[in-house]
């Protein structure tokens, strides 16, 4: 059999394993009845993404990212990318055309899109493990990788947010770079994936920078084979950034610099970095010796730094440096995924185990590799991404999504090594050690242990209070009464914003998005102020309804912040004379109050 035939057979095998893992994950969700389709679990982003796709299908412009039904009159511009909206919309359009049901088409898209991304991520994880540790690491990578991805939750049905896309692209870029020495197009495709990662969201900027810097360093210090890899990666990265810029940014906005979304800032930096790397790798005098390569890349780095410092200095500030202090105190500081490792240690030690155990084990394994010598190209790529992802996760918990995924590769190599030992020298002791290695490598084991510990010591703090009530107002059914009412503006807390938009045709002020400053502050003014203050907001902005979720953690936080405020009074049952309860909603998860027409 030829090498090409062997390669095709391996690809088919990896695809088959990824498909099997995906079918099993879908079967588990199907057995449970796809609960996420009717209960978003508090994930506002998934719901707002669906709203954004609906708006686009309803003829909102491709370049128009306004969310018109959230915020003050006229809405605000979201920082998300149409690159994620487009495939979801395409699925909905295709299924709707076949079935004639838009609602069914949306359900299909909410199941199919995350499943496709799950399959691709498992596939690229298997490919990366094969390149890192050989064929014996593939099965462990699929098993522990699929388990880790499943329990992360970002690939569950209904997961339309962009984090799953970003993780898939990061694993694809890494996998392709690992294969680049033996597959010519791989480096170009890796650069393309890195460019798309940056375009989808700025959260992955550290990983994009790490991948690019790793390619540059391998070229600077490595053999001649890295030259073509660096050239192709640079071309792919710059090319993807240029295409995305033209395809997703309106010509009228080409001169606008945005730090939190793909704009002229990222296009210029990516263009200089990609074309600069490709040029240095292509021009023979610049890459002739190691010293010249290092000097040339150093000049490129200096140019990039100068461009950022002098042209876009605003992007050097912390992401939320200019956020209003009230929003930081009452919103940002209470977002779970934005908390640091140190805050998590103080408030939820069990959660630290779930998020950081397998990445720490993987880091220890990489450190042992480095200590034993024989450091390889593969170790540099995997190790750099794992270290950076762990550092990001220490800053914000959301980074652990990537560190858990990257940890699968060295963990799979570790399991493969013990499997080989067990086959070569079968004994009870080796078998037990191999079983232990398997167990500690499965992130779900740590997550389950952490959850059990948390329940044992702290009690059940879930949204459901044990009698089936939707205490935190996360279920679609809890918004049915609101959805039947004529469209108006609803005064509600920020965590009700996305569900109200998804499950009704109403307008809201508040939503948990950093660009919606004015709308969020207005809602805070109403809820934390007196009844008279709230009435002024209601009158000035033609509010027709007030929605209350008494069981929400956000409602309790705001009530505690202002015990004499409007929201606290509503939660105590003190309804001002200018409001009247909507029939059938008293005592429900979402209580509704209508503004009296004569008030």
Image (tube, rainbow, N blue to C red):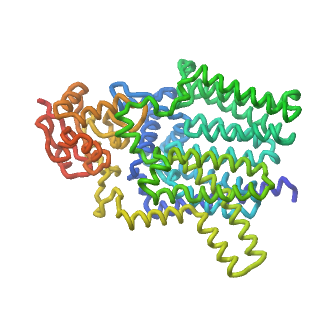
The answer to whether residue 255 of the structure is visible from this angle is yes
Q: Quadrant of residue 374?
A: bottom right
Q: Residue furthest bottom?
A: 428
Looking at the picture, tell me which residue is in the foreground, 372 or 327: 372
Task: Please give left or right for residue 149 compared with residue 454 in the image.
Answer: right
Is 583 placed above or below 205 here? Answer: below
Task: Please give left or right for residue 301 compared with residue 389 in the image.
Answer: right
Q: Position of residue 573 (x, y in %)?
A: 15, 47
Q: Position of residue 539 (x, y in %)?
A: 20, 27
Is 214 placed above or below 292 here? Answer: below
The answer to whether residue 98 of the structure is visible from this angle is no
User: What's the residue at 18%, 34% (across, down)?
Assistant: 530
User: Which part of the image, by quadrant, shows the C terminus?
Assistant: top left
Is 443 placed above or below 205 here? Answer: below
User: What's the residue at 72%, 47% (across, down)?
Assistant: 381
Total marks drawn?
Answer: 0
User: What's the residue at 50%, 50% (across, down)?
Assistant: 341
Q: Position of residue 186 (x, y in %)?
A: 76, 43
Looking at the picture, tell me which residue is in the foreground, 210 or 588: 210
Q: Position of residue 454 (x, y in %)?
A: 41, 63
User: What's the residue at 86%, 55% (across, down)?
Assistant: 3
User: Which part of the image, by quadrant, shows the N terminus?
Assistant: bottom right
Task: Please give left or right for residue 498 compared with residue 105 in the image.
Answer: left
Q: Quadrant of residue 102?
A: top left
């Amino acid at each position: 059999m030829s090498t090409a035939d062997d390669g095709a057979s391996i690809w088919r095998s990896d695809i088959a394993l990824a498909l099997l893992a995906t079918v099993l994950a879908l079967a588990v969700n199907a057995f449970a009845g796809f609960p996420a389709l009717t209960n978003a679990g508090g994930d506002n982003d998934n719901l707002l993404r669906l709203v954004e796709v609906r708006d686009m299908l309803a003829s909102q412009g491709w370049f128009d990212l306004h969310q018109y039904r959230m915020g003050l009159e006229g809405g605000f511009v979201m920082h998300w990318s149409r690159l994620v909206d487009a495939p979801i919309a395409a699925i909905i359009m295709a299924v709707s055309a076949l079935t004639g049901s838009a609602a069914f088409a949306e359900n299909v898209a909410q199941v199919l899109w995350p499943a496709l991304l799950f399959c691709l991520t498992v596939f690229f994880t298997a490919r990366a493990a094969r390149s890192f540790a050989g064929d014996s690491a593939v099965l462990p990578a699929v098993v522990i990788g699929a388990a880790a991805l499943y329990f992360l939750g970002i690939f569950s049905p209904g997961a339309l947010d962009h984090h799953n896309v970003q993780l898939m692209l990061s694993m694809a870029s890494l996998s392709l770079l690992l294969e680049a020495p033996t597959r010519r197009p791989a480096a170009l495709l890796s650069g393309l994936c890195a460019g798309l990662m940056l375009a989808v969201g700025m959260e992955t900027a550290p990983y994009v920078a790490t991948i690019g810097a790793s390619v540059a360093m391998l070229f600077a210090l490595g053999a001649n084979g890295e030259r073509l890899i660096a050239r192709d990666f640079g071309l792919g990265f710059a090319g993807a950034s240029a295409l995305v810029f033209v395809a997703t940014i309106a010509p009228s906005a080409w001169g606008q610099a945005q730090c939190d979304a793909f704009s002229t800032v990222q296009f210029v930096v990516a263009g200089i970095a990609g074309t600069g790397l490709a040029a240095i790798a292509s021009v023979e005098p610049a890459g002739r010796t190691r010293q010249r390569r290092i000097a040339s890349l150093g000049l490129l780095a200096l140019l990039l730094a100068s461009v950022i410092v002098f042209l876009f200095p605003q992007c050097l500030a912390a992401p939320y440096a200019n956020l209003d202090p009230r929003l930081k105190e009452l919103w940002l500081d209470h977002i779970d995924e934005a908390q640091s490792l140190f805050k998590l240690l103080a408030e939820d030690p069990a959660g630290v185990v779930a998020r950081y155990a397998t990445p720490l084990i993987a880091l220890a394994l990489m450190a042992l590799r480095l200590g034993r010598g024989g450091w390889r190209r593969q170790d540099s790529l995997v190790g750099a991404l794992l270290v950076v992802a762990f550092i990001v996760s220490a800053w914000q918990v959301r980074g652990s999504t990537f560190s858990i995924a990257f940890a699968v590769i060295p963990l799979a190599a570790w399991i493969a090594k013990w499997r080989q030992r067990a086959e070569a020298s079968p004994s009870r002791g080796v078998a037990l050690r191999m079983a232990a290695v398997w167990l500690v490598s499965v992130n779900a084991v740590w997550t389950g242990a952490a959850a059990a510990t948390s329940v044992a010591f702290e009690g059940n703090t879930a949204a459901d209070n044990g009698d089936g009530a939707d205490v935190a107002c996360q279920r679609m059914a809890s918004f049915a009464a609101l959805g039947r009412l004529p469209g108006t503006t609803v005064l509600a807390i920020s965590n009700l914003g996305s569900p109200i938009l998804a499950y009704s045709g109403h307008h809201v002020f508040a939503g948990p998005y950093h660009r919606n400053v004015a709308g969020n502050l207005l809602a805070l003014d109403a809820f934390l102020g007196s009844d008279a203050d709230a009435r002024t907001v209601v009158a000035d902005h033609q509010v027709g309804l007030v929605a209350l979720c008494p069981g929400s953690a956000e409602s309790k936080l705001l009530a505690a912040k202002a015990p004499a405020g409007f929201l606290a009074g509503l939660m105590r049952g003190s309804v001002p004379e200018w409001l009247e309860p909507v029939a059938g909603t008293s005592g429900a998860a979402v209580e509704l109050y209508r503004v009296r027409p004569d008030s």
